[in-house]
Amino acid sequence: MTALPQTHFSPCLDPPGKPEVTDVTRSSVSLCWTVPFNDGGSKIVGYVVERKVYSTDEWDDNRWLKCNYTTITENYFTVANLGEGETYEYRIIAKNASGVHSAPSESSGPVTCKDEYCTSVSSDILCSILFTTSLVSLCVLYFICSVCYLSCSFAQFLN
């Protein structure tokens, strides 16, 4: 995995928007981003997604690594084959039809690979409680709506 050389960036081609995380699993992260405001005079033809191991150390020597080896033409991508529990940050680079690369987007910030759904016994219990609470709330809401409906129907009947 290699990073793009810094010398190919153009000040005329705006960077894409900050990548937003749309899904996380134990081995993948799905991202989306906004297209660059200024395309540098040529249509945007693709994007490069890069990642690096997240570190709070400003002197870290982690390098940005390319995540895709085929052209990404849409403004979303899923990075796969990541390590469970690993924390990465992501950035996006745009490329226009003239072959010019933008500066990198703002970093996504730290994203840890883990299943967002119930995976442990304690979280299973928590999810069961939340589901039961939601079910009870729905039943109460249904009862209130039914009473209101009956009241309105009865009032119309009397008129």
Image (tube, rainbow, N blue to C red):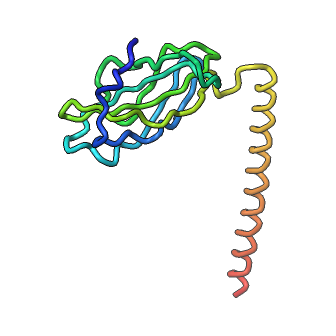
Q: Is residue 73 visible?
A: no
- The residue lying toward the viewer, choosing from 159 and 124, is 124
Task: Looking at this view, name the residue that lies furthest to the bottom.
Answer: 159
Q: Residue at x 40, y 19 (%)?
A: 66
Q: Is residue 20 left or right of residue 39?
A: right
Above or below, comparing residue 3 to residue 89 in the picture: above
Above or below, comparing residue 94 to residue 36 in the picture: above
Tell me how many marks there are: 0
State the image coordinates of residue 35 (x, y, percent, origin top left): 35, 42
Above or below, comparing residue 27 to residue 145 in the picture: above
Q: Residue at x 49, y 13 (%)?
A: 81
Q: Is residue 50 visible?
A: yes
Image quadrant in which the N terminus is located: top left
Image quadrant in which the C terminus is located: bottom right
State the image coordinates of residue 55 (x, y, percent, origin top left): 62, 22
Q: Quadrant of residue 100?
A: top left
State the image coordinates of residue 91 (x, y, percent, origin top left): 45, 30
Q: Is residue 125 left or right of residue 101?
A: right
Q: Residue at x 58, y 18 (%)?
A: 60
Q: Residue at x 20, y 44 (%)?
A: 41
State the image coordinates of residue 121 (x, y, percent, origin top left): 79, 20
- The residue lying toward the viewer, choosing from 110 and 124, is 110
Q: Quadrant of residue 112?
A: top right
- The residue lying toward the viewer, choosing from 81 and 107, is 107
